[in-house]
Image (cartoon, grey):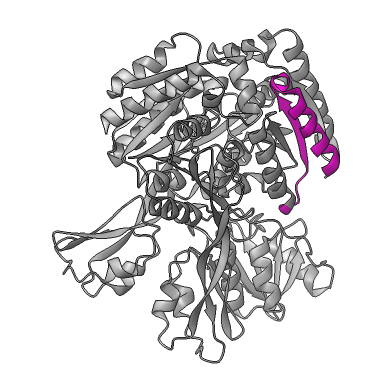
Amino acid sequence: MKKLLILSGKGGTGKTTVASALISLSGARAVADCDVDAPNLHLALKPSGAPERRDFIGGKKARIKPLACVGCGECVKHCRFHAVRIRHDTAYVDEIACEGCGVCQLVCRAHAVRLLDDVAGELTLYRKEGAFSSAELKMGRGSSGKLVTEVKLALFGAAKNEPLAVIDGSPGIGCPVIASISGVDLVLIVAEPSVSGLHDLRRLCQTAEQLRTSVAVCINKYDVNEKKTEEIEAFCREKGLSCVGRVPFDEEIARMINESHTVFELKGAAREALEQIYQKTMLLLQEPS
Amino acid sequence: MKVVIPVDENGKTVCVAFARAPYFLVCDTQADQGELMENPAASAQGGAGIKAAQFVLDTGAEALITVRLGENSAQVLQEAAVRIYRSMDGDAEKNLDALKKGALSELTEFHAGFHGRA
Amino acid sequence: MRVAVLSGKGGIGKTFVSTNLAASTRGSVYVDCDVEEPNGRLFLPCESAASKEVCIALPTFDPQSCTGCRACVDFCQFNALAFIGKTPRLFREVCHSCGGCRLICAVHAVGEQSVSVGSVEVGVSHGVQVVTGEMNVGEASGVPVICAALAEALRLHSELTVIDCPPGSACTVTESISAADYCLVVAEPTVFGVHDLGMVLRLIQTVGKPCGVVINKCNGAFPATELLCREHGVPILARIPYQKELAACISAGRLAVEESEEIWRIFTALKERIGGAV
């Protein structure tokens, strides 16, 4: 199974839009949405059937028994995450700030602290036509990397025999991105021709380089700033990264997503550009890593 | 020499995962029977590779036979001078025999962690 | 007044709104909490900025004092410690820096060392005090850098502090909005935008902060967005039109309030509406 991951660095460059076009063009039946903070791929792909859902245990959270607490404040003093506070002489835990380290339990003289499993999100798996794996992280949680890994494992488990898996990643360069890059054959970065876009592209490429992963780049809405587009292409040449195509700005693309059409209903230069990106990406994927 | 092999629920097939394998078979090149032990890291929230590698160290094993291994686990084992061998197709018993005959090669490539961290 | 600007989905215009909001008030503070990809200073470049390292405390182990009891290894919820040979060994990417191993050691064999995870830069640009948090590439969590950037920003006195938040709804976002009096949510009139707007509004309601919405890239009404705001009882404070010239201006790294009379008026009115709500 070849694994293609689509990233962007900066948000809003068109990652999910390009991912859904590539999924349609390749006919890939193994798909994952690893943007667990804000999963959107299901809105573009509209998977059918009832999905399997399961809770995701992210870590632990501390809970203080108010009647057992003697208000000594040791927990507040030692918590490095400012997650324990005193109110009316009793300590309580801020569920969002708590990292489940257990220090408050360690220093509590009154045995008033419990460390409990935290349901930090929900995983969904559609299996009617191939496999579509996704998840949503509960707000304020910090286990996004682990959840991303579970989304991928659920996909690989359900679609073992598929030749191609397409994974829609998340913005940024932190934990969920690092977790999504692990084990993929190719990262396709959807870049935006702007000062911010180029800045974030550099940092994302640095991240991928540290993880020794092959990278290809495509430029979305390239004609909004052709000068920046050239700068991005020059950057790719400098780093030895394949530039697999550039898509012109086209309002039809936004309408395609908003009205749930597929790339096959798109016409003109934007369609041609997406087809070219698809062809070149597939060729790169066939190369031995 | 004590050897550890990660195995599936059936206790016989070599598990494709190391840190998340349900059981470890702890066997001896000098003895017939191995002992099946639960992997304490199987459902760990994070750092599973480190915890599983610690388990291997604590058995006193001198070698591990596995399909693949993460960077963190590899570091723990290498620092403790535990030899790491690449598993061949087949069940645990077959792999142990191969090890005794010197037919297994060392595992030298380790994959990046799966990031259980916040 | 401290206003956090957030959006849920990326690329909707958080940085566009926060930099222009800050630039429309002389002496305001702009703090960039999108520490993985800080972009604000591309629009508010500072000539001479002072930079401070952000460090976290990681444990160190003294082999001379260590008795090998392994209480620290067993305590660690994150399995960041392995006991090899004579002492525990730290795996730093997995360590949460909670200090527990140090507390539990009965023979004081666990010390601490300071390790850099990023930086906070402070400067001035276009009449705005600019604070930028930047996480080192390869770090897993930006939260310590966000905390440091916010601490720096809150030290500066100003009538208006604008907090530019990261995308999403994870711990980085909740940390960024923790100090805010008001949350300004930037929304986009698309199917993806509506979905993520709902998610962000729920987050803000959970933490209990007053909020309002700005619809960006607006080309006429998108009923789904308007309906969602009504359902949540959240006011729409401004609608920023989609204009190709505006997109070009942003892509070149320029401040729209300095180039467009219309945008200047929109942001001035927006500021007044927020002020009225706080």
Query: Which residue is at the front of the view, A202 or A63?
Result: A202
Residue, far bottom: C64
Relative to A86, C54 lies left or right: right
Residue B118, can we see it?
no
Q: In which quarter of the image is the N terminus of chain C?
A: top left
> Residue C100 colored magenta?
no
Query: Which residue is at the front of the view, A120 or C4?
Result: C4
Which residue: 61% across, 36% down?
A10
- Is A34 rendered above or below residue B94? above
**Residue C104 position in % (x across, y down):** 40, 79
Query: Which residue is at the front of the view, C263 or A175?
Result: C263
- Is A98 rendered above or below residue C193? below
All told, the count of numbered labels is 0
Which residue: 14% across, 63% down?
A89
Q: Give the range drawn in magenta.
A: A210-239
**Residue C13 position in % (x across, y down):** 52, 28
> Residue A227 colored magenta?
yes
**Residue C27 position in % (x across, y down):** 43, 41
**Residue C69 position in % (x across, y down):** 47, 85
Q: In which quarter of the image is the C terminus of chain C?
A: top left
